[in-house]
Amino acid sequence: MPNNNSRRNALKNLAAGTAALGVLPLAGMAFGQPAQKKSSALKGNVNHSVCRWCFNNLSVDELCTEVKKLGFSAIDLVGPKDWDTLKKHGVFSSMCNGAEINLVNGWNDPQYHNTLIKHYTEHIDLVAKAGYNNLICFSGNRNGMDDETGLKNCVQGLKQVIGLAEKRGVILQMELLNSKVNHKDYMCDKTPWGVELCKRLGSPNFKLLYDIYHMQIDEGDVISTIKTYHTYLGHYHTAGVPGRHEIDDTQELYYPAIIKAIVSTGFKGYLAQEFIPAKADKLASLKEAIQICDV
């Protein structure tokens, strides 16, 4: 399965080019909003997006064209080098990346704080100048560390950049990943741990990226968790369980009910498809996923 390494490599490649990036034109995009009005074919209750790395068979240009055909205009996990391409198509970068070191060396380990503070300070400014507002981050692996130490270390490091994020209108979103199948030893693998980090930081500009696939594997009880902790959840990812493939009736989650629960909380952020297409017609799978989630 390409799950772990594929995403790590994709994040690494997408992050390239940050240093050479200048200020990009806003191209008429409203800050923090979808680049264009939703297609009349979609209901308008959900801000749809798709993760770039899952469709690496297409160029960024091609993926932009295809998502517009499907009636939405946002792509997740896009690095700075591709933002001008998105802007050319009127497509929004719904979750920016490139500031992270990787998925395993993160904010829970003080030895990486200096590097992360430098990267995130630079990247927060880049995200804000480009007119975007979501920037991903990761806890890192435990490596024998207990939960409380990890929380304290994350708070210590993140407090060095959260003030700038507040000033620039950028939301840092720490992703919840499963440590059972795909990301062994990852620390932020349970929603309550992530929520406690949010509480300790006490900033509206720090939230959790709730990955439905990952949290079904590590803790289950998805709808109840979303309803209980929705104020701390700033972004959502999808994929089928097991296998991280299509979200159709071949897997165990019933996405229409999950998405209805998200909408019922008043959520106005983005829901991004992050499944690895197993079927030959990958774009048909994406179209079906959008239809399933367009409640």
Image (spheres, rainbow, N blue to C red):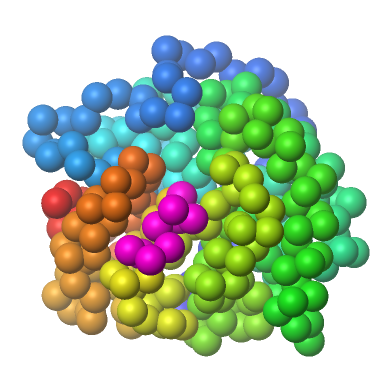
Instruction: Residue at 31%, 72% (x, y): give it.
Output: 224
Residue 65 or residue 221, whichever sits in front: 221
Residue 223 or residue 2, whichever sits in front: 223
- List x then y, in percent, for residue 177: 53, 71
Instruction: Name above or below for residue 68 compared with residue 107.
Output: above
- Decide if residue 267 is on the left or right side of residue 106: left
Instruction: Name above or below for residue 33 compared with residue 135.
Output: above
Is residue 142 visible to the viewer in this orientation of the structure?
Answer: no
- List x then y, in percent, for residue 178: 51, 77
Report the span colored magenta.
226-234
Instruction: Residue at 33%, 46% (x, y): give it.
Output: 267
Is residue 272 visible to the viewer in this orientation of the structure?
Answer: yes
- Quarter of the view holding residue 43: top left
Instruction: Residue at 64%, 76% (x, y): give it.
Output: 186
- Decide if residue 212 is on the left or right side of residue 247: right
- List x then y, in percent, for residue 198: 61, 57
Instruction: Name above or below for residue 279 compared with residue 147.
Output: above
Instruction: Name above or below for residue 290 compared with residue 134.
Output: below
Instruction: Report how many numbered discs are placed on residues in the image.
Output: 0
- List x then y, in percent, for residue 8: 61, 63
User: Is residue 125 magenta-colored?
Assistant: no
Q: Main secondary structure of the magenta part?
A: helix
Instruction: Residue at 25%, 44% (x, y): give it.
Output: 46
- Decide if residue 141 is on the left or right side of residue 193: right
- Quarter of the view holding residue 185: bottom right
Residue 35 or residue 168, whichever sits in front: 168
